[in-house]
Image: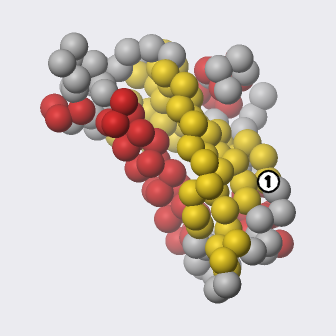
Amino acid sequence: MRDDPRRRLIDNYPWRIDLETRFTDMDINRHLNNVAVARLYEEARVRFNHGLWRAHPTIDRPHYLIGHVAIDYLGEGSYPAPVTVGYGVGSIGTKSYRTAMGLFQGGACIGLSDAVMVYRGPEGPAPIPDGLRAILEGWALRG
């Protein structure tokens, strides 16, 4: 993640959300702490998926399991400035896809995160349906 220069540019993320930071997000050094940063990525991931389902009611509501989460911390974030999380689909496999997210504050990229989202059927992990796959392909990371 860290070595991919396109990940550090907000314009390469097809979906973005502005999120407020909270007083309780600070560590003893007055920076956004690692748990708060993970929460910001999670909030963006959940809102993207919720919005995706609401925008495409013809597909069954997708259910996911988190298979893996990775976070690279590139800079310090601070309270009370808001952050922008950029979101794109990094790659799509048979039963899962990888998110590609960037965390920006004051125009600077302060972090990157990937998460593997495993599609869940009634019996557990299952192939991503063709309709959902086509929609996810439309949200591919640019660059």
Residue 14 found in image quarter: top right
Which residue is pictured at 53% across the width and 32% down the height?
71
43 shown above or below 61: above
Residue 62 % position (x, y): 61, 73
Residue 58 shows up from this direction = no
* In-image side of 36 versus 44 (left or right): left
What kind of residue is marked 1?
A: Ile
28 shown above or below 46: above
Q: Nearer the viewer, residue 101 or 71?
A: 71
32 shown above or below 92: above
Which residue is pictured at 82% across the width and 56% down the height?
93
Q: Quadrant of the N terminus?
A: top right
Residue 135 shows up from this direction = yes
Residue 48 % position (x, y): 53, 55
* In-image side of 85 versus 11 (left or right): left
Number of numbered discs on residues: 1
Residue 44 % position (x, y): 46, 47
71 shown above or below 63: above
SS label for mark 1: strand
Which residue is pictured at 57% across the width and 37% down the height?
70
* In-image side of 47 versus 62 (left or right): left
Residue 65 found in image quarter: bottom right
Residue where numbered disc 1 is placed: 92
Residue 120 % position (x, y): 65, 73
* In-image side of 79 versus 121 (left or right): left
